Image (cartoon, rainbow, N blue to C red):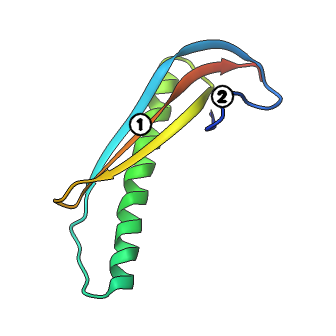
Amino acid sequence: MVLTTTNSIEGHQIKDYLGIVTGVSTNQKTSFSFKTEKNKQLYREFINEAKEEAFQDLTDNASKLKANAIVGIKLDIEMSSTSYFFVSVTGTAVKVSV
């Protein structure tokens, strides 16, 4: 499946717009280090895990609509004060010429 933040895919024509799809994931940072660099690495790992889960959810939802691409993808990452990460990915599921 082609994923892009742009509204078109070079070399392909959008044949059908199938609807808006989303992918959501939450992840809680459960590890802590007193070393700043180690903490930064832990945050990166937790955010990346949540992001991957959200993108997988996004593509699964697009596949249910028989899409072969998602255009206009937007990514939002938020963190609550309790060390929860919320990742939301939204885009438009489309069918493009192959």
Give the farthest residue toward the top.
16
- Ranked by sequence position, the earlier of labels 1 and 2 is 2
Dividing the picture into quadrants, the one containing residue 12 is: top right
Q: Is residue 18 above or below residue 60?
A: above
User: Mark 2 sits on what residue?
Assistant: 7
Amino acid identity at mark 2? Asn
Q: Which residue is nearer to you in this view: 47 or 63?
A: 47
SS state under label 2: loop
Give the farthest residue toward the bottom.
35
Dividing the picture into quadrants, the one containing residue 68 is: top right
Q: Residue at x 35, y 62 (%)?
A: 46
Q: Residue at x 45, y 41 (%)?
A: 56
Could you give the CA–CA distance between mark 1 and mark 2, rounded to whole angstroms? 20 Å
Quarter of the image with the C terminus is top right
Q: Which residue is nearer to you in this view: 82 or 63?
A: 82
Closer to us: mark 1 or mark 2?
2
The tally of labels here is: 2
Mark identifier at residue 86: none
Q: Position of residue 55 (x, y in %)?
A: 47, 42
Q: Is residue 70 above or below residue 41?
A: above
Q: Is residue 3 left or right of residue 47?
A: right
Quarter of the image with the N terminus is top right
Q: Position of residue 10 (x, y in %)?
A: 80, 32
Q: Is residue 48 above or below residue 37?
A: above
Q: Is residue 51 left or right of residue 18?
A: left
Amino acid identity at mark 1? Asp
Mark identifier at residue 57: 1
